[in-house]
Image: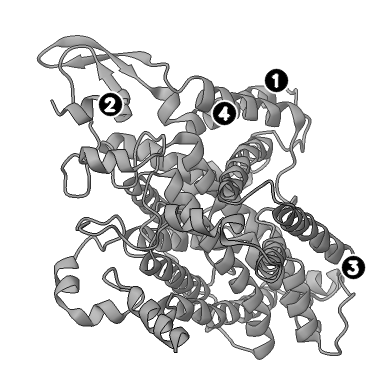
Amino acid sequence: MDPCAMGSSNQLVLSIVGAGEDVEPKNDLGTPRSCQERERRKADITYGIDDIPPWYLCIFMALQHYLTMIGAIVSIPFILTPALCMKDDDPARSHIICTMIFVTGIVTWLQSTFGCRLPIVQGGTISFLVPTLAILNLPQWRCPDSEVLEAMSHENRTELWQIRMRELSGAIAVSAILQATIGYLERKKETHSKTVFRLTSSIAFSTILLLTVFSQCLPEVPIPIPSYKRNQGFVIIWFHLFKLFPVLLTIMIMWGVCGLLTLSGTFPVGHPARTDVKLRIIHDSPWFRFPYPGQWGVPTVTAAGVLGMLAGVLACTVESISYYPTTARMCGAPPPPVHAINRGIATEGLGTILAGIWGSGNGTNTFGENVGAIGVTKIGSRRVIQYAAFLMIIQGLISKFGAIFIIIPQPVVGGMFCVMFGMIAAFGLSALQYVDLNSARNLYIIGFSIFFSLVLPKWMVSHPHVIQTGNETADSIITVLLSTSILVGGILGCLCDNLIPGTAEERGLTAWHQQMKLEAEEGDTTSTYDFPVGMGLVRRCNFFSYLPFMPTYKPRNLKKCGAKKGHK
């Protein structure tokens, strides 16, 4: 046996008494990773980015990611459809949900396979709801009075919300062209509001407690499982259940608890933890439906809509760029090089264009919840996310299947998000390890940027009409920008860090450059961020080295040009 593999923590996944199946992680070529590569990756993970778990484990791991993102996906249409003037019981609401999940699956597969190639999920985001609601709040798009709506025929009511959806679709698709262009040509928010889930104290706290125990206290505790093998008879398999499926176990257990409390009548009617609150979704969902581009009509394009939606595109771009190095660290991958970051942003822009054309009413962005799930489960395999993408595509076609998971009780979802976003915040703050935290300059920038970015958006929500430039479109754009906390904090921190004097060591630039190199190691012919196919042609053609989104791109050429100009 390979001595390197014997010392790997990955062997802890399955320990079988007697001869058993070899589940040592393998790379995309089907061979074990080298000792040198394993030593280079410092993250404490079970499956790294290039590892391929057994297919049956991939299915359950993919289900964890699906359950993590489904709550956020479903929340968006429930906020969007009232602003579209749609009836609460309109079956088209489930069609929008299926369309969003279908597009999420397609874009997630593209991103993890040919985009940045990190194990991230791309889907609908609350960040796009802010400009969306601002657009729909314009005088020409406001809903008529309730009496007028009730008097409308079904055909007129359908056309009423579809014409608004066409406006949003055009605005989303056109504004995303800028994001795709940034990625392909570049050369060098609250993500979740308090609208959908309410943390019912007992269920939410139990969810948090259970997930903490499973993921942090019991990951190395194996569970004996009887199994039958043809050549050995009955044997005992020691399976690290808590290490691989902490999220899935927590959801299943707490969902069952909520079901028992619902049957016993402990939860009153209408309680958010009841398991029968959303049962009508299953009844109203069709068995099969294929979402198609332009299903609500040909998208329309207006200047006001496009300019307003650009704020959401800009916020999502900044947010996703911040997730890439964090995700790479979580899954034990090298820091993403320039070409991978460029492809990631471009693929996200392409995904938003597809979402607009398909009529999902929203764009695409990196799901922070799934990034947090990698930190909790310590499973960063790209293959798992690809399995999850196919699961989403299937669910988008089989509506009944997806409706089952939509009825997860809200307090359970809320408890999961508390842990997930806590992991995201912790990994984000870990970047501060490179700066001098004994510096009064750095403490001022960090404190002011974080606090002001929390205060200003809250104040803008309380004073929505404070911006008065005389132009409604400009008012909407400025309001959206100032209401996005990640954008406010990022711009403020960037300005302060570059305007307030400080040394490179004090600012952490020296340590960061050494740790987070954007160029692949010399001689690394099996880069994590290379295309899965066609790399022979890419390496043979020198032309591709000048394209900033190709794996052979060489940004050092630009640095040399810049150095010469500066020297001159």
Res. 1 in view: yes
Of the 4 image quadrants, the one containing the C terminus is bottom left
Q: Residue at x 75, y 41 (%)?
A: 198
Q: What's under tag 1, amino acid-wise?
A: Ser
* Residue type beneath disc 2: Gln
Label located before the other in sequence (1 or 2)? 2
Q: Is residue 22 visible?
A: no
- Three-letter code for the amino acid on which mark 4 is drawn: Leu
Residues under numbered marks 3 and 2 in contact, where contact means CB atoms less than 8 Å apart:
no
**Mark carried by residue 211:** 4
Element on which disc 3 rests: loop
Which is in the foreground here, disc 4 or disc 2? 2
What residue type is disc 3 on? His
Rendering quarter of residue 524: bottom left
Single out the mark in the foreground, 1 or 2: 2
Q: Earlier in the sequence, mark 1 or mark 4?
A: 4
Q: Is residue 198 above or below residue 395?
A: above
Q: Which residue is mark 1?
A: 264
Expressed as whole percent of the image width and height from the top left, the position of residue 560 reads: 36, 79
